[in-house]
Amino acid sequence: MKIHAMIAEDELMARKELFYLLSQEEDVELCPSAETGEQLLELCSEYEPDVIFLDIQMPGISGIEAAGKLIDQAVHYPPLFIFTTAYDEYAIAAFDLEAVDYLLKPFDELRFQKAMKRLRNQLRQRERKLMEPYVSNPKSSGPVKLLIDDGERTVVISPDMIYFAMPHKRILEIHTKDRVIMSRMTLQDLEKKLVGFPFFRTHRSYLVNLNYIKEITPWFNGTSNITLKDMEHIQIPVSRTARKMLFQMFENNH
Amino acid sequence: MKEMTILLFERLGLLLIIAFVLTRFPGFKTLLNREFNLKMSLVHAGVFGLFGIAGTMAGVVIDGESVSHFAFVMTAVEKDQLVVSLSLVAVVIAGLLGGPIVGTGAGLVAGIHLLFLGGVGWLANGLVNPLTGLLAGLTARFFSQERVISPLKALFIGVFPPILQMHLLLILQPVGSDIIDKIGLPLVLSNSLAIAIFTAMIAIVLKEQENEAAQATRQALTIAEEALPFLKKHHSKEMAAGLSNLLRERLKLAAVSVANKQEVLAYTGIGDDHHQPGQPVGLSLAHEAMETKEMKVATTRSQIECSHKSCPFEAAIMIPITEANDVIWLITFYFRKAHHIRPVELVLAQGLGQLLSNQLNVLAAQSLKLHIRDAELRNLQAQINPHFLFNTLHLIATLFREDPKKARHITVQLAQYMRFNLKLVSNPLVPLEKECDHVNAYMEIIQARFTNQLKIVFRCPETIPNVFIPPSTIQPLVENCIQHGLRNIASDGKVEVMIQQEDGRLRVIVRDNGCGFPPELLNEVTNKPLNEHQNSGMGLFNVNQRLISLLGEEAKLHVGNLASGGSEVSFQIPMEDPNLKGGF
């Protein structure tokens, strides 16, 4: 299993140091590095690394703040964090963010190896969790109707009519076979209402009905695209983490 | 009756002369201050009793209906004669000034004397005196908040004793009412007026005394205040010269010298042909003054011990000045004649000595406080920012692999930076060149760490001027730019450090092109330690405090935002300040 790692560090030489250390590890695949907190947020949603080596002191958004944002934004599970810092005054903040480890500069190589070991262990645990069968909510069986307010009327719809939903400019588009219902509710609200039905977040802004998936085509960098039945023209992105979970689900339940 | 009145007034005039002499006695002051004990009260009673007897003697004797003899009443009188005594004036004043005990005592003395004189009204005369003394003493209690009863009130009070006397005369020894007619009004008039005049006299004496004291006090205070700028001078000769000039001018003295324990530091005034600065302090009296820490007065030529034939001085006051309980100077006032030294001069000299000593102690305490504060701040400054240290070590660790030559260079820079910081604790001032080296070492390290993020430009004159400056004052300003101004700048950050010489002043300017100071912090940043970011919020405050405490208010930091964005922090120090030439 490859570990996708990202470096977030504002000092060039410090980046080089981590780059060197990580390139010595055979199972690590390096994503592009971020030099500021803002850049990290962008690169992260693009590359979805498994782990970020995160410097705490950076111009703009600090490492701690950036990690907090990434955790809040995560659809399924956030990346793991290994904080790197010159002085251990932020250990408690890092602990709160459930960091894998906390490396003090300059890095001790043995200490670095230990951090990598911890990282591999945690990634393995995550993997194991994914292997567990995907249990749907047993309570919600039978035909249930959904009430959706589109601003003018309340539309009654049965969950199995929904193909997928995505937000577009603050309006949630709920796609059924032949029409699109616009609502002011959020994707999260809809996801909550649909607990127990075979819906899955393939991406931060896509909720897809598993029953309509026709095919999954691999895209670059571990991501994929989904094509739905009856809607071949629409490509729905699947993030790398979501793809793993999706395959796991199909293997266990279908 | 008219003649009687005039006669009594004449006699009272004599009495008032005696009273005037009384006010000149030193013990008289205790009466005015109302500080009595029993012994002093008895003494006062006795004195006023005698005064009363004098009053009696200054009175006249009436024989039947006419004034028989005008001579002073010295001996006992015949049975049918009446003594018209003026003793009540003394007794009333004793009571008013000294209270019931002094009043009654004086009355008893005067009364007993009258009893012995005898005559028609002997009992009445004898009784009225102690009675009046007691009553006047009790009356005085109502005026206890006034130091001396106002003459008008005294006039009013003075009306009653003669009336009382007339009553007693009528009750105890019924003499003819025509005698009362004859002496009644004149007695009332003369008594009350004499008492009023006497109180007025006391008031004048008191005021005189107080004026003199107030003036001396004011003068001493003014001089002490004017001496302050001289006392602040670090150079002892300058200070001594200033002080001696000031004292001679203000006190109009013949000559003044200021000496330390060994030699005369300054001398001004006449006799400067043979009294000169640099001479050793030879007077045995002067040594005595310094040893005992007490003022000494020389009143003869021999005590001045001047071998010069035409030495103009006959007297001198030697005032030791102490600092922290140690005599550091001796100020000598010279006088041509011994009688030029009045008590006022002595009190003034003593007071001045104390005031100057106090001021020196206050100044010493202040400067000690400043130095302690400065040492504290330097100590804080010397604590190397751990982020800086470990990030630099991290950089060096990487450079070993990437660029070993540079790794060596940065290690040397870090060593230099740290060496300077360690020395910071022990040196209040360093040569500007060392400070520049420190800034350079810091810049090199920062540049290596943030290669493609920021650039530091250091502009200083080719030959760095030979000035001393408080250490680590420039580097924290640069650090502040990097940690705050350029905090959110990921590329193209720029810090400019400029050292300029401008008409005798050294100007240091640090600029950046970052976000500038938040407007609400502009005024606070140098006056308050801002602790939001560990180690760095202190920077500007710390530097500002040290600049001000070592070089004064004009060296303070000027903080502002540039119109083009970014901030500018600058300060100026005088290049010729003797404080900056290793005076510590």
Image (spheres, coloured by chain):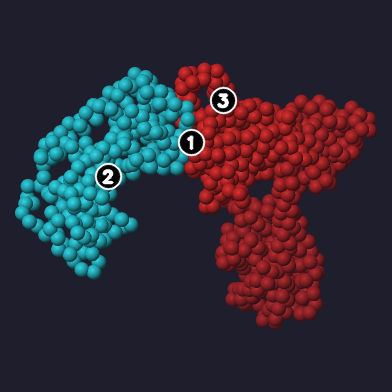
What is the letter of the red chain? B
Looking at the image, can residue A240 be seen?
Answer: no
Residue type marked 3: Tyr
Pointer 2 and pointer 3 on the same chain: no
User: Helix, strand or loop at disc 3?
Assistant: helix
| Residue occupied by mark 3 | B417
Q: Quadrant of the C terminus of chain B?
A: top right
Looking at the image, can residue B245 be seen?
Answer: yes
Taking depth in this image into account, of B403 and B431 the one nearest to the observer is B403
User: Helix, strand or loop at disc 1?
Assistant: loop
N-term mark: 3 or 1: 3
Circle 2 marks a residue in which chain?
A
Circle 3 marks a residue in which chain?
B
Q: Residue at x 54, y 28 (%)?
A: B448
| Residue occupied by mark 1 | B535
- Label 2 CA crowd tier, 10 Å (few <14, some 14–19, many 20+): many
* Circle 2/circle 3 CB separation < 8 Å: no
